[in-house]
């Protein structure tokens, strides 16, 4: 993962003070611009920095007069400067061993800003938050209970359906119900999870799959310009294409049903398998409709 350089943490509005400015002037600058340290210049040359810590430790603690004490008399001059394109993590490591929490950043030998440990940590936190938004649904943070509750319901519903089915001998085809279970409980209020789409889609998938399976088994191998070795591949692809067409045509689109049509061809399945899967999708749809008032769309 590429780490951000210091340029990404800089506020381009650079606030500086002259070495002959008083502590009171510098404190006022810090307050006006909400900064914790200010670079001290001698003309265009950086000669030191004054931080909140300097004002507290030198001016207040030593009883100096803020109105008359000049920056050059109490500023920090032992500086570690850093490059504009330096790695943020390397900079943070340097800060850990430095008594200063704010360090000047140079570009082509000229100061372009100040960066503190707070700036780096804040920037890294923003990046971390961005990655969390990329990889994790933002809604989960605000509604964890619903996510866990519907996950439990999904597991329970699938468990009940599988108990009722001959899933060991028809594992590949029954597996399509897993995808339908996800749709039913992750999108319970969408059209795609309604009985019309779930049961209707499977009915279309079963009919097109059964028709193509019958054709593949009973038509002579020279009936289509396809090599014998790819005969079932051809009819499997045709089954998916026909299932897609008729689901769209009849407004019963349900993607897992296309896998049913393919499975019926490739696994030479019979009416028993079709009945089992249709019973399974009907049972799953019924369970979802009963629980629907308790469910929310998670997507």
Image: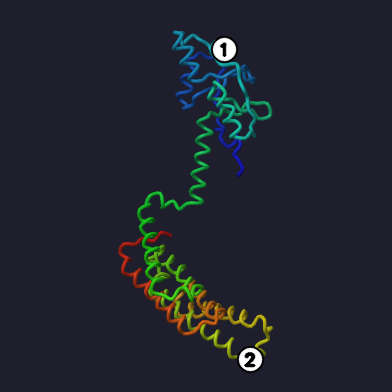
Q: Name the residue beneath numbered marker 2.
A: 220
| Image quadrant in which you'd find residue 192 | bottom left
Q: Is residue 135 above or below residue 35?
A: below
| Image quadrant in which you'd find residue 146 | bottom left
Q: How is the image coloured?
A: rainbow
| Disc 1 element | helix
Give the CA separation, mark 2 to mark 1. Answer: 99 Å
Where is residue 165? Give x, y as percent: 41, 75
Q: Residue at x 50, y 36 (%)?
A: 122
| Disc 2 element | loop
Where is residue 242? Give x, y as percent: 54, 81
Q: Quadrant of the N terminus?
A: top right
Q: Residue at x 62, y 35 (%)?
A: 87
Mark 2 surroundings: few (<14), some (14-19) or many (≥20) residues within 10 A: few
Where is residue 290? Give x, y as percent: 31, 69
Q: Residue at x 40, y 63 (%)?
A: 155
Q: Residue at x 68, y 26 (%)?
A: 109
Report whether 180 appears left or right of 265. Answer: left
Q: Quadrant of the C terminus?
A: bottom left
User: Of the numbered discs in the image, which one, if any, rests on residue 93?
Assistant: none
Q: Name the residue beneath numbered marker 1.
A: 72
Mark 1 surroundings: few (<14), some (14-19) or many (≥20) residues within 10 A: many
Q: Is residue 134 above or below residue 237?
A: above
| Contact? badges 2 and 1 (CB < 8 Å) | no
Eye-nearest disc, 2 or 1 = 2
Where is residue 47? Give x, y as percent: 61, 17
298 or 227: nearer the eye? 227
Which circle's residue, 2 or 1, is located before the other in the chain?
1
């Amino acid at each position: 993962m590429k780490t951000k350089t210091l340029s990404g943490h800089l506020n381009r509005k650079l606030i500086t003070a002259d070495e002959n400015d008083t502590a009171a002037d510098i404190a006022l600058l810090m307050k006006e611009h909400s900064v914790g340290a200010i670079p001290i210049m001698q003309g265009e040359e950086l000669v030191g920095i004054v931080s909140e810590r300097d004002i507290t430790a030198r001016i207040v603690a030593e009883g100096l007069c803020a109105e008359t004490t000049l920056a050059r008399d109490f500023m920090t001059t032992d500086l570690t400067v850093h490059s504009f394109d330096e790695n943020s993590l390397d900079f943070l490591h340097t800060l850990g061993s430095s008594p200063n929490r704010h360090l000047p950043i140079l570009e082509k030998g000229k100061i372009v800003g100040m960066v503190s440990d707070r700036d780096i940590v804040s920037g890294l936190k923003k990046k971390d938050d961005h990655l969390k938004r990329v990889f994790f649904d933002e809604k989960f943070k605000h509604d964890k209970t619903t996510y866990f509750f519907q996950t439990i319901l999904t597991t329970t519903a699938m468990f009940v359906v599988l108990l009722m089915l001959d899933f060991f001998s028809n594992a590949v085809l029954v597996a399509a119900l897993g995808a339908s279970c996800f749709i039913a409980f992750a999108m319970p209020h969408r059209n795609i999870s309604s009985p019309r789409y779930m049961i209707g889609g499977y009915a279309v998938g079963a009919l097109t799959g059964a028709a193509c399976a019958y054709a593949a088994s009973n038509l002579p191998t020279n009936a289509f310009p396809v090599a014998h070795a790819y005969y079932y591949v051809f009819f499997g692809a045709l089954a998916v294409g026909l299932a897609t067409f008729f689901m769209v045509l009849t407004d019963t689109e349900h993607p897992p049903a296309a896998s049913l049509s393919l499975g019926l061809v490739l696994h030479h399945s019979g009416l028993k398998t079709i009945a089992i899967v249709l019973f399974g999708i009907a049972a799953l749809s019924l369970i979802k409709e009963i629980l629907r008032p308790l469910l929310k769309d998670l997507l």
